[in-house]
Amino acid sequence: MTDPLPPLPPVADSLPGPAEAELSATPEPSADADQPAAPEPATRGAGRRPTAAALAVVAVLAGGALFLSGFALGSLRATTPGTPVDEETAFQPFWDAYRSVTEHYAGPPVDRKQLIDGAIRGMIAALGDPFSAYLSPDEYRQSLQGLSGRFEGIGARVEARRLSGTGDCPTLGNGCGLVVVEPIQGAPAEKAGLRAGDRITAIDGTTVDGQTVDQALARVRGQKGTTVTLTIVRETAKPFDLPIVRDVIVQPEVSTKTLAGGTVGYIRLSGFSDQAASDFRAAVGADVAAGRDRLILDLRGNPGGYVTDAQQVLSQFVPAGTTIFSQQDATGTRVPTVALPGGAATDPSIRLVVLIDGGSASASEIVAGALQDLGRAQLVGSKSYGKGTIQVWQQLADDNGGFRLTVDRWLTPKGRWIHGQGLTPDVPVDASTAGGSDPVLDRALELLAAPSSGSLAERRAA
């Protein structure tokens, strides 16, 4: 058995989930506006803490063998072990099938652990929620590595995107593709020529169809120095193979620069992992200390991460004690989360513009939605992704991997649930035909009455 992983705080994600390891996965949101809920009075200053059984990441649940609840059922234990009496009838078919397979299957020897893993995977998959999933031991560890901001892989963010038809994308194929949101700057993916908008159809010659995003990502990640070959579809060109040598990826999630002759502070936040909040706090503090009273927060392509980090980011701009979002659980109970004290830019004279796009998801939308509802910032760009749920990660006992499960909805300060809809910017900007310029950033500077940014090369030269 491998060493247990340490507990983590809840995540709104995880753009796959977020899974932001070597790729940052953002599954297609459900069109059903009735997914998990957001929380009522019980104000908290640091966001609701996960239960003792949950490994909080934006993810879920703690150990224990499958269906074993600790109930002693006397003479029934032999036929329905661990099943509560009031659920015995419902679970009887499961135990009948399990005993038939383990006692009478005439094929190769039965791996009981594999059967249990499959049962758990099927149970989570039956929810039809693209953000809830069973993870093998390797998938579970790789997912948590991604949330830490350090992992071994190629360094690119991806999402499951609906290419045709309607509905969710719990698995790839049938109109759902694995699409690159963006390669991480300086990572092997970027150096090899992978581009935003590329669609990955196969990994090492094997199709991704029928797999979840997590399963596909597990195949792309791997040991430093090894090579993975992705089959890429790019616009109207013929599919081609792109070999990429894996490396250790240390994902910088906060980058800064000054614009308009040093009068405007620009902060790009590309994720919400372990180190992001403290780095962001330092960046905002440095701008304010330098006397800059016009700031731009760039959340474009940010797939989300820890809910607690979203709270800390918002606390830099919102007075302490202000409700910044709420979580609503399966019972409909709402619990508000408030801004923490000590924010560097809570003075309303410090003007703020936030940049968003279709890759801004989850914790990014918590931040942008709160700033919009509270009138603290204008949103500029295009409609955001639309993920209004929070997941928790839970490790299972005896090296049986773990799973992430949707446990809450989150709501903006005005009670909006943006799941499947996204946030509509206050100032829409079409950047699809921009070429080498950045019209979204230029528009933000106009709103702040500052000179435009010029070229894309300038924008990336942080």
Image (cartoon, helix red, strand yellow):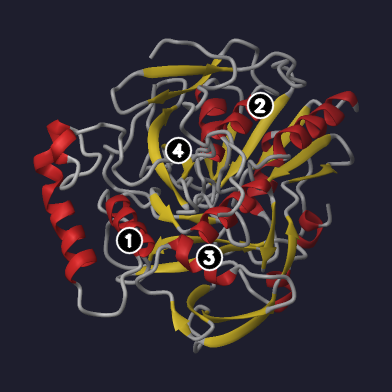
Q: Residues within 10 Å of mark 3 (few under 14, many from 20)?
A: many
Relative placement, left or right, of 255 versus 300 is right
Question: Residue 128: x percent and y percent?
Answer: 28, 52
Q: Which mark is on residue 118?
A: 1
- For discs 1 and 3, the disc positioned in front in the rendered view: 1
SS for tag 3?
helix
Task: For marks 4 and 3, give the one nearer the viewer.
Answer: 4
Count the numbered circles shown.
Answer: 4
Question: Do the numbered discs 1 and 2 sit on residues whose CB atoms are within 8 Å?
Answer: no
Residue placed under numbered mark 3 in the picture: 217
Q: Is residue 248 above or below residue 377?
A: below
The circle drawn on residue 360 is: none
In the rendered view of the protein, which quadrant contains the N terminus? Answer: bottom right
Where residue 172 appears, as percent x and y from the top left, is: 37, 68
* Kind of residue sitting beneath label 2: Gln
* Residue 257 falls left or right of residue 177: right
- Choose the circle earlier in sequence order: 4 or 3: 4
- List x then y, in percent, for residue 298: 66, 43
Task: Say which residue appears at 37% left-offset and 64% top-offset.
Answer: 114
Residue placed under numbered mark 4 in the picture: 62
Which residue: 47% across, 53% down?
401
- Checking the image for residue 312, the label placed there is 2
Task: Tell me which amino acid carries mark 4.
Answer: Ala
Q: Earlier in the sequence, mark 2 or mark 3?
A: 3
